[in-house]
Image: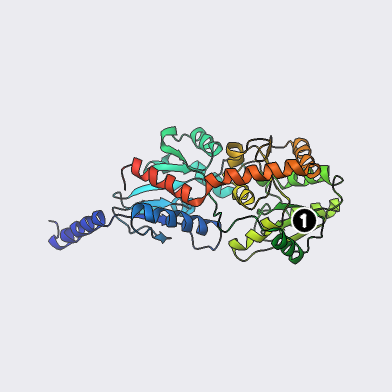
């Protein structure tokens, strides 16, 4: 016989859950990119929903709620069997494909598509990630494409005097042509002497080797951990560089503002955010044809694209920007125009439209 008190408590939880149904955003507790994704998406959703969007790390006790896993790791490696079936689940999968040397990605891919059985929609940021998931057996109608965003209020071009001051503070010589690379591309969290091939640090060095004689002031600005492989390569090529490890994600804005160009040489990506952040800071981008660059760059208009591994083509594109200030200005302006469509508030509106289409808000 059912305990009347337990039955009453269960009924009370169900009624309260339905009355106070909210979107909850699940992320980790780190002070880096995932945290700010959560902040901006929640901030953008709140006025559209007319209620707060709690940002949490432990959703396991929720009932009758909408749960958006903005970070997939808690979902795949947490106790997801504890999630109550009354919840409606959404999950982001920004990047990752099997057999690229990342054990955690391989473990997640091995669980697909069964791990998505309870997920209403899987959100990807680019067509490349969509294709990867479909190849792993995820039905196309379960996948929603919503890009990553940027805060144009924080990420903005620096005025000429401000930019000069930033470059002096970062010890970038006057007249230097400074190329940026702000990703973690070494194995582990130490020096990073072993490269992560998926991030293309070998291709980055191959590109720089091809262009090192074009501009007498060529130099590289690095941030991020585990950059030992790239640093040793730059030393071998006798290309000067500056490397700074940042304590806070938002410190990176002034590093973009110091650049003349940003190079993306990854073999696989879901973003990277460097595309939008560079554009918003008025920095031209040359990229491999993958991730969001493949979807958003119009070759020669707001950036340049080359096939993965084609460092000869990338070098030609960088040389053209180095040697043609008018072209560099046109590409910079094209990036600034394109990135307006990737402001976080517009991205949040796409999440809201998805929730409405699914009938959960």
Quadrant position of residue 225: bottom right
How many numbered callouts?
1
Residue 361 position in % (x across, y down): 31, 48
Depth check, front residue: 99 or 327: 327
**SS type, badge 1:** helix
Left or right, residue 241 beside residue 116: right
Question: Is 7 located above or below residue 346 in the figure?
Answer: below
- Pointer 1: what residue? 231
Q: Position of residue 311 (x, y in %)?
A: 76, 38
**Any part of residue 166 in sight:** yes
Which colouring convention does the figure follow? rainbow
Q: Residue at x 45, y 36 (%)?
A: 138
Name the residue located 49 percent from the left edge and 34 percent from the top edge. 134
Estimate the x, y position of residue 181 in percent, counting from the top left: 70, 52
Q: Residue 133: where, in percent of width, then height?
A: 50, 37
- Please state if 255 lies on the left or on the right of 87 as rendered: right
Residue pictured at 19% horizontal, 59% vertical: 12
Seen in the picture, residue 109 relative to 157 is either above or below; the reply is: above
Name which quarter of the figure residue 335 lies in: top right
Residue 268 or 5: which is nearer the viewer?
268
Compared to residue 318, the image places residue 11 above or below, namely below
Q: Residue at x 53, y 34 (%)?
A: 131
Q: Residues within 10 Å of mark 1 (few under 14, many from 20)?
A: many
Q: Quadrant of the N terminus?
A: bottom left
């Amino acid at each position: 016989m059912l305990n009347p008190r337990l039955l009453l408590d269960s009924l009370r939880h169900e009624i309260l859950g339905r009355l106070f149904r909210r979107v909850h955003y699940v992320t980790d507790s780190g002070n880096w990119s995932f945290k700010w994704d959560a902040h901006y998406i929640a901030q953008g959703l709140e006025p559209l929903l007319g209620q707060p969007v709690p940002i949490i790390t432990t959703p396991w006790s929720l009932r009758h709620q909408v749960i958006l896993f903005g970070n997939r790791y808690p979902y795949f490696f947490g106790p997801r069997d504890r999630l109550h079936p009354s919840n409606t689940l959404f999950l982001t999968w920004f990047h990752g494909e099997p057999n690229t040397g990342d054990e955690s990605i391989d473990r997640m891919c091995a669980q697909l598509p069964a791990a998505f059985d309870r997920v209403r929609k899987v959100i990807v940021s680019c067509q490349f990630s969509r294709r990867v998931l479909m190849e792993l057996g995820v039905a196309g109608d379960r996948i929603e494409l919503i890009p990553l965003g940027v805060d144009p209020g924080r990420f903005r071009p620096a005025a000429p005097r401000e930019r000069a001051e930033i470059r002096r503070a970062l010890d970038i010589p006057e007249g230097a042509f400074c190329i940026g690379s702000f990703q973690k591309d070494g194995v582990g969290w130490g020096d990073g002497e072993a490269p992560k091939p998926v991030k293309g640090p070998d291709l980055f060095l191959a590109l720089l080797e091809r262009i090192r004689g074009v501009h007498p002031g060529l130099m590289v600005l690095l941030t991020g951990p585990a950059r030992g492989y790239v640093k040793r390569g730059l030393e071998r090529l006798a290309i000067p560089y500056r490397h700074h490890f940042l304590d806070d994600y938002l410190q990176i804005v002034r590093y973009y503002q110091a650049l003349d160009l940003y190079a993306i040489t990854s073999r696989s990506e879901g973003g990277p955010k460097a595309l939008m952040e560079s554009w918003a800071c008025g920095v031209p981008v040359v990229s491999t044809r993958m991730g969001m660059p493949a979807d958003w760059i119009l070759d020669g208009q707001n950036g340049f694209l080359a096939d993965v591994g084609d460092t000869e083509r990338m070098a030609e594109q960088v040389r053209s920007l180095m040697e043609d200030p008018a072209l560099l200005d046109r590409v910079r302006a094209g990036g600034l125009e394109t990135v307006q469509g990737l402001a976080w508030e517009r991205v949040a509106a796409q999440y809201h439209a998805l929730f409405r289409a699914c009938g959960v808000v």
